[in-house]
Image (cartoon, rainbow, N blue to C red):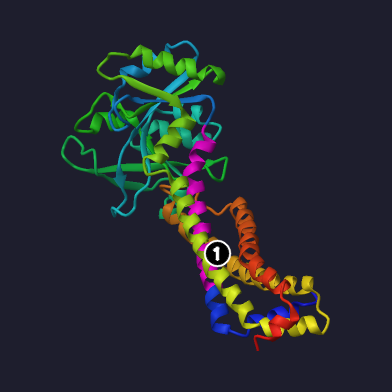
Amino acid sequence: MKYIYFVWKNLGRKKIRTVLTILSIMIAFLLFGLLRTMGSAFEMGAELAGEDRLISIHKISLIQPLPISHIAKIAGVNGVEDVTHASWFGGYYQDPKNQFAQFAIEGDKYFSIYDDLVTLPDEQLQAWLKNRIGAVVGRATATRFGWKVGDRIPLISSIYPQENGDRTWEFVVEGIYDVKDEHADSSAFLFHYDYFDEAKSFGKGTVGWAIVKVEEPEQSARIAADIDALFANSFAETKTSSEKDFAASFAKQFADIGLITTYILSAVFFTMLLVAGNTMAQAVRERIPELAILKTIGFSDFAVLNMVLAESLLISIIGGALGLAAAWLVAGAMASQVAAFMPGFAMDVSVILLGAILILSLGFLTGILPALQGMRLTIVNALGRR
């Protein structure tokens, strides 16, 4: 700390070069913060998935429906505590840009199976069960559009027209559900399957997937195999997996976000090592005679090493801190816009801690070679370069 004056003055020698280097590091850590936050949001669904729930879909693909008769048969499998179903609606509100998840579900069974994640006041639940066109919406979506209980909401389905050809479906908000974990999905729009199945123009008597609650989580693999064996060689074979595996595979349909972000960030930080390393090497080369003078008047080799290394760390810390702060602000601003697809989109403390480690690592790696060069300088050879 006693050499901070020298460090600060040296950074100001080439102001434009220093500023450009700091901005480069700032952009790198802005990308780091946003990409890591996005990767964590995609993985969050799998982390919150219940150990006692299975998801059963059509063996061909998720978009292939299952006959509703499968639900009663699954309920009879040994070890199944309860079973319900859900179907993707595929609609939007007012404008195609206003996308969010909408599911046709089965009464209060859905909330019973997901009671570890979502909460809904009982009076709202009862009001919803009594209203054929009633809907329950997550807090995030209700806040996003300013909806409240009693509002009539028209949704335009891009998949399911009604029997009369009209693609506009009208619902009444009877409840707003909250989540017990801040990273859980609070953006879904839930409505009655019976109303949906009666009014849609095709696909009657089918559901999107089955949600199975098992009595003993350790028996999940056996129960999944029994369910799939039950429908083997039928016209609608199933593929059953744990909810965690299902959530992870669903996220990877978009791409392996974790792997992609790792590749991108590796390329970014390799580039930053070259940029910042070259900056520090150039700065030391320009000051070789001055470093020799410092040694002449009594500065030790170790003191010279510390000063050069401190310059590199200071540049990295300033740029990295600005980048992480910018990423935090941008992530906060984006959260409401991407809540429908990434409900857990928020910069976690772990991202900031990892960023801090990378900031220090970048500063050390880019400064250590020039610092060693300065430390090893001999006074005679260095002064001879004047």
Q: Quadrant of residue 229?
A: top left
Residue 26 appears in view: no
Callout 1 crowding tier (Cα within 10 Å): few <14, some 14–19, many ≥20: some
The span picked out in magenta is 22-49
Give the side of residue 69 with respect to residue 244, left or right: left
Residue 58 appears in view: yes
For the residue pair 162 and 333, the one nearer the viewer reads as: 333
Does the stretch in magenta take in 24? yes
Q: Residue at x 34, y 47 (%)?
A: 153
Residue 167, given in percent of the width and then of the height, sits at 21, 43
Vertical placement of 5 versus 180: above or below?
below
Q: Secondary structure at mark 1?
A: helix
Residue 273, given in percent of the width and then of the height, sits at 55, 64
For the residue pair 231 and 319, the one nearer the viewer reads as: 319
Q: Quadrant of the C terminus?
A: bottom right
For the residue pair 335 and 102, the one nearer the viewer reads as: 335
Residue type, label 1: Leu
Q: Residue at x 49, y 39 (%)?
A: 45
Q: Residue at x 69, y 80 (%)?
A: 8
Among all residues in the image, which is located at the extreme left? Answer: 164
Residue identifier under label 1: 273
Residue 249, given in percent of the width and then of the height, sits at 41, 35
Does the stretch in magenta take in 341? no
